[in-house]
Image: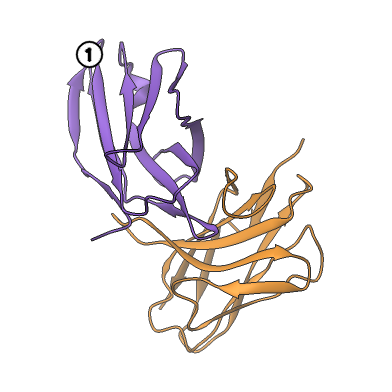
Chain colours: A orange, B purple
C-alpha cells in the first residue's frame, strides 16, 4: 500500500523540549512538505524539500528545523524557540514541486504545556 | 489581499440540494488548481483537479475562470457524507497555496 505515514498521532511535551515528528512516504515522490494548521485556520507552509539533501523555508520556518537525508523521509523538529508550538502538523508529498497535487499523511497533533 | 480567498461559510443545506462554492486567487500566473476535502480533525484529501475546460466527477463539477481569477465547485444532490471543509488550492511561485476552506453542513 503506497502512502504517507506520520508518527505519532498525538504527542505531548513540556515547554523547553525539542520534539521530532516523523514523516515517511513510499510513493517515490521527490518533493515533501510540512504544514501547520491551527484551529479554524488554513494550512501554513513550514518547510519544503524538492530533492534529497536540499530544503527551503516556507512562510513560518522560525523555531523549526528539517532534514532530508533520504528520499522517503522528511522529519520535522519543533525546537524550544518556537513560541506557540501546539498545533496539528501535516506532512505531504508530491511528484514534483509547485504544480502537482500533494498527498497528505494523517497528521500529528502536538500539545506543548 | 490574500493569495487565495474563500467564503468560510458555514453553508447549511438540506440533503439533495445543489450547492456551489467560489474561490478567488490573486496571481494571474497560477497554473494549477485543485479542490481538497478535509473532514474534522483529519488530513486534507484531493477531491479533484481543476482544468481550464472544466471537469466533472460524478456529482462534483469544477470550473476555472482565468479572466476573473476564480474557481468554483458545484455539488449536486448533496449527501450527508459531503459534510466537510472544502479547500481551494492554487499554485503560486513553485508552491501550492491553500485557502482557509469553506465548511459545508448537509442536514437530513
User: Which residue is at a point 37% across and 27% down the rendered structure image?
Assistant: B63
SS class of the residue under badge 1?
Answer: loop
Front residue of B66/A49: it is B66
In the rendered view of the protein, which quadrant contains the N terminus of chain B? bottom left
Number of numbered discs visible in the structure rendering: 1
Q: Quadrant of residue A43?
A: bottom left
x, y percentage for residue A7?
64, 58
User: Which residue is at a point 68% across and 57% down the rendered structure image?
Assistant: A31
Front residue of B103/B35: it is B35
User: Which residue is at a point 31% across and 22% down the rendered structure image?
Assistant: B74
Left/right of residue A29 with respect to residue A12 in the rendered view: right
- The image shows residue A18, relative to residue B71, as above or below, that is below
Q: Quadrant of residue B56?
A: top left
Left/right of residue B30 with respect to residue B101 in the rendered view: right
User: Which residue is at a point 39% across and 20% down the rendered structure image?
Assistant: B61
Front residue of A84/B2: it is B2
x, y percentage for residue B2?
27, 59
Front residue of A12/B47: it is B47
- The image shows residue A70, relative to residue B7, as above or below, that is below
Left/right of residue A79 with respect to residue B70 in the rendered view: right
Q: Count neighbours of disc 1 (C-alpha within 10 A) and say few if under 14, some if 14 to 19, many if 20 or more.
A: few
Residue under label 1, please give it.
B17
Left/right of residue A67 with respect to residue A16 in the rendered view: right
Amino acid at each position: 500500500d503506497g502512502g504517507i505515514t506520520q508518527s505519532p498521532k498525538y504527542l505531548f511535551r513540556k515547554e523547553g523540549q525539542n520534539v521530532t515528528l516523523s514523516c515517511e512516504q513510499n510513493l517515490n515522490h521527490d518533493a515533501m512538505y510540512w504544514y501547520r494548521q491551527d484551529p479554524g485556520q488554513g494550512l501554513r507552509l513550514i518547510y519544503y524539500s524538492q530533492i534529497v539533501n536540499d530544503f527551503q523555508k516556507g512562510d513560518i520556518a522560525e523555531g523549526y528545523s528539517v532534514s532530508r537525508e533520504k528520499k522517503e523521509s522528511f522529519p520535522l523538529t519543533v525546537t524550544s524557540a518556537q513560541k506557540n508550538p501546539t498545533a496539528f502538523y501535516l506532512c505531504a508529498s508530491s511528484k514534483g514541486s509547485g504544480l502537482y497535487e500533494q498527498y497528505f499523511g494523517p497528521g500529528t497533533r502536538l500539545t506543548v504545556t | 489581499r490574500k493569495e487565495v480567498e474563500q467564503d468560510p461559510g458555514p453553508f447549511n443545506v438540506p440533503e439533495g440540494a445543489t450547492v456551489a462554492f467560489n474561490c478567488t486567487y490573486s496571481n494571474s500566473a497560477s497554473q494549477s488548481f485543485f479542490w481538497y476535502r478535509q473532514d474534522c480533525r483529519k488530513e486534507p484529501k484531493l477531491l479533484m483537479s481543476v482544468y481550464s475546460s472544466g471537469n466533472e466527477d460524478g456529482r462534483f463539477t469544477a470550473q476555472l475562470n482565468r479572466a476573473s481569477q476564480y474557481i468554483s465547485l458545484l455539488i449536486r444532490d448533496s449527501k450527508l457524507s459531503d459534510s466537510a471543509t472544502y479547500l481551494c488550492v492554487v499554485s503560486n511561485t513553485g508552491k501550492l497555496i491553500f485557502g482557509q476552506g469553506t465548511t459545508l453542513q448537509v442536514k437530513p
